[in-house]
Image (cartoon, rainbow, N blue to C red):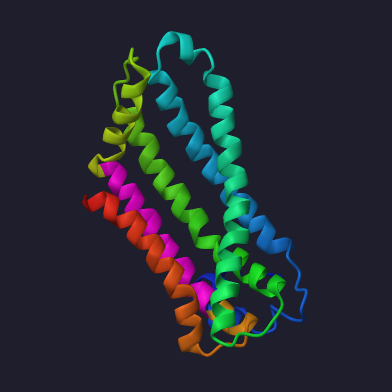
């Protein structure tokens, strides 16, 4: 039985004995990633519906299909993200002398995604109420839609939503550090480097557009 409190608040106590053998059980990490995918898909549907409302009538008729593509892409993207982040952690940890099967790293990456579910829900709520207050008018030139969406995403409330998501990613990073220590037999320093490099890059990619 998974102790969610330990995972979220005491990851150092959660992982010992949890990642056993070269092929640990991936059912719970998969469930976490699937839930994250569902929340991401709902958020994508909200943003896509606003984008389609700006489109000219001849394009807006394809709204259902385009929104559907956005939803499916967001859901599948969560699964792809899971594998990619695990691969990055595994690769960096190998350079730091890490030992252990990739499936162990995959389990850690999945468990660590739990805070991001809460972050996506909270930022999704902010985005929902922000978009609910926006007066949407169709734009005749499709090329202007991108500019309008960019302007909308640069509003203070949308930036707050981005920062909220980032804070929960940092929470996930804390879990990943302790998980990678266990999964790849790393020291605290090496686990911090393994997780810190990709997370720092992600933070910069998120923060810099908000500043500039």
The magenta segment is 157-177
Q: Quadrant of residue 158?
A: top left
Q: Position of residue 26 (x, y in %)?
A: 73, 65
Q: Position of residue 95 (x, y in %)?
A: 55, 82
Q: Nearer the viewer, residue 107 or 57?
A: 57
> In the shown orientation, is residue 41 left or right of residue 156?
right
Residue at 61 percent across and 85 percent down: it is 98
> In the shown orientation, is residue 79 left or right of residue 142?
right
Residue at 66 percent across and 63 percent down: it is 29
Residue at 54 percent across and 85 percent down: it is 96
Main secondary structure of the magenta stretch: helix
Marks counted in the figure total 0
Q: Nearer the viewer, residue 3 or 154?
A: 154
> In the shown orientation, is residue 73 left or right of residue 136?
right
Q: Position of residue 14 (x, y in %)?
A: 60, 78
Q: Quadrant of the N terminus?
A: bottom right
Q: Quadrant of residue 19?
A: bottom right
- Asked if the stretch drawn in magenta spans residue 84, the answer is no
Q: Position of residue 108 (x, y in %)?
A: 61, 71
Query: Vertically, is 147 above or below 20?
Result: above
Which residue is most to the bottom? 187
Q: Nearer the viewer, residue 96 or 36?
A: 96
> In the shown orientation, is residue 37 left or right of residue 192?
right
Q: Quadrant of residue 102?
A: bottom right
- Asked if the stretch drawn in magenta spans residue 166, the answer is yes
Q: Nearer the viewer, residue 117 or 55?
A: 55
* Residue 6 visible in image: no
Residue at 35 percent across and 31 percent down: it is 131
Query: Vertically, is 183 above or below 33?
Result: below
* Residue 42 visible in image: yes
Which residue is most to the top? 58
């Amino acid at each position: 039985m998974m102790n969610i409190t330990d995972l979220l608040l005491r990851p150092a106590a959660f992982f010992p004995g949890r990642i056993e053998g070269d092929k640990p059980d991936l059912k719970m990490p998969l469930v976490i990633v699937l839930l994250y995918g569902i929340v991401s898909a709902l958020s994508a549907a909200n943003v896509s519906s606003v984008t389609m409302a700006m489109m000219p009538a001849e394009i807006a008729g394809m709204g259902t299909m385009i929104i559907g593509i956005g939803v499916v892409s967001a859901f599948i993207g969560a699964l792809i993200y899971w594998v990619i982040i695990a691969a990055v952690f595994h690769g960096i940890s190998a350079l730091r002398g890490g030992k252990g099967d990739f499936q162990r790293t995959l389990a850690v990456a999945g468990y660590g995604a739990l805070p991001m579910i809460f972050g996506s829900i909270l930022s999704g709520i902010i985005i929902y109420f922000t978009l609910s207050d926006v007066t949407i008018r169709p734009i005749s030139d499709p090329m202007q839609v991108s500019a309008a969406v960019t302007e909308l995403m640069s509003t203070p409330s949308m930036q707050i939503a981005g920062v909220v998501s980032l804070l929960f990613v940092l929470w996930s990073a804390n879990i990943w550090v302790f998980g990678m220590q266990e999964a790849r037999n790393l020291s605290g320093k090496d686990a911090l480097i393994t997780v810190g490099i990709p997370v720092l890059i992600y933070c910069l990619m998120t923060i810099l557009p908000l500043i500039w």
